[in-house]
Amino acid sequence: MQLNYFLKNILFLYFLLLFSSSSYSQKLLSGYILDNETLEPLSYSTIIIENESRGTYSEIDGLFKLDTTSYSSKRMAVSHIGYKTKIIQLNSFKEKDTVVLVQEEHLLKEVVLKVYNQKLNEKWYKNNIKERTFITSPARGTTYAVLINKHPKKKFGSFELYYLPQKSSPQNKIRIKFLQRDINGNPSDNQLIRKDLIYTLPLNSERITIDLAYLNFIIPEKGFYIGIEFLGNKEDQVHSETTVYYTKKIRGNKTYLTTWNKRWLHVSKNIANRSRYKNLKFSYSIFR
């Protein structure tokens, strides 16, 4: 009698685990992101569940894997810089299906491009204070935006970001964005440079210096925001975080953040309102 009871419990647990494993596997959605003309894979495309703080990126071969647990009735937004965003119903998307994105044709009028002049004088606005203050490491999918509202009509040069050194591979990556200010002066999702600017953070270094002079970007009258999107790394997508430094040298409330394109949060006001370390630590240069 006891043996039958024991066997029943074992069988029950077995089928429970089997069902749980099966149902979980059905919630992991995968597919490929391709260019509609060349059919080439689009790496680091962004795939987000609409109105939720959940998303992922496509890999080098265009493959993406998205955990859709509890979201099968919702839609996902697939986007890539320079392409039109595509909205897809999750419950209609088949496993290993292909998403084809169409390139955009328009450019924002506020961007002014000029021929690069090697004789221009570069001036750095360096942040050399040896600060060691940082907030919680931004997770994969987080974008910081810092305001640069000086030097209108000057050519933008380089950008420098400071962070806690990464000791081992695989190295984390970031994507740089040039974001337009909205009517309230906050960062918008409109990108002034329609290029995919992805960089790998150097190992055993606490800074990355990115030369952006080749873009020939002229700073708009009202300024703009530099966006730093943290892409993490391929092998450890969940925990591939980069710890960034904050500073007391930069005055005012100039730092925002968003995760998976949710509403922008004004970090300087809402998180660091009692601290002297209000803004993300960075340096930049312009050409005069």
Image (tube, rainbow, N blue to C red):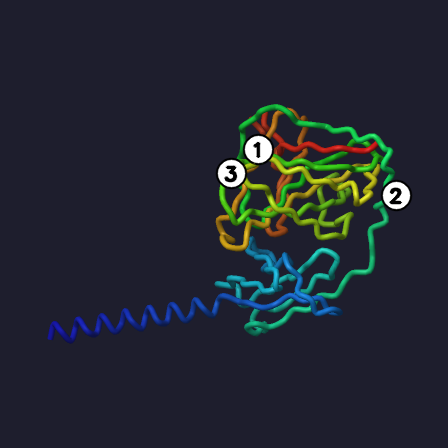
User: SS of the residue at dot 1?
Assistant: loop
Dot 3 or dot 2, earlier in sequence: 2
How busy is the neighbourhood of tag 2: few (under 14 within 10 Å), some, or many (20 plus)? few
The vertical placement of 234 against 152, above or below, is below
The vertical placement of 243 against 239, above or below, is above
| Quadrant in the rendering for residue 128 | top right
Q: Which residue is mark 1?
A: 245
Query: Pointer 2 and pointer 1: residues touching (CB < 8 Å)?
Result: no
User: SS of the residue at dot 2?
Assistant: loop
Query: Pointer 1 and pointer 3: residues touching (CB < 8 Å)?
Result: no
Dot 1 or dot 3, earlier in sequence: 3
Q: Which residue is mark 3?
A: 136
Q: Amino acid at mark 1?
A: Tyr
Q: In the displayed orientation, state which residue is furthest to the left.
A: 1
Q: As drawn, is 2 to the left or to the right of 143?
A: left
- In the picture, the quarter occupied by the C terminus is top right
Q: Which residue is mark 2?
A: 114
Q: As drawn, is 95 to the left or to the right of 102?
A: left
| Quadrant in the rendering for residue 48 | bottom right
| Quadrant in the rendering for residue 153 | top right
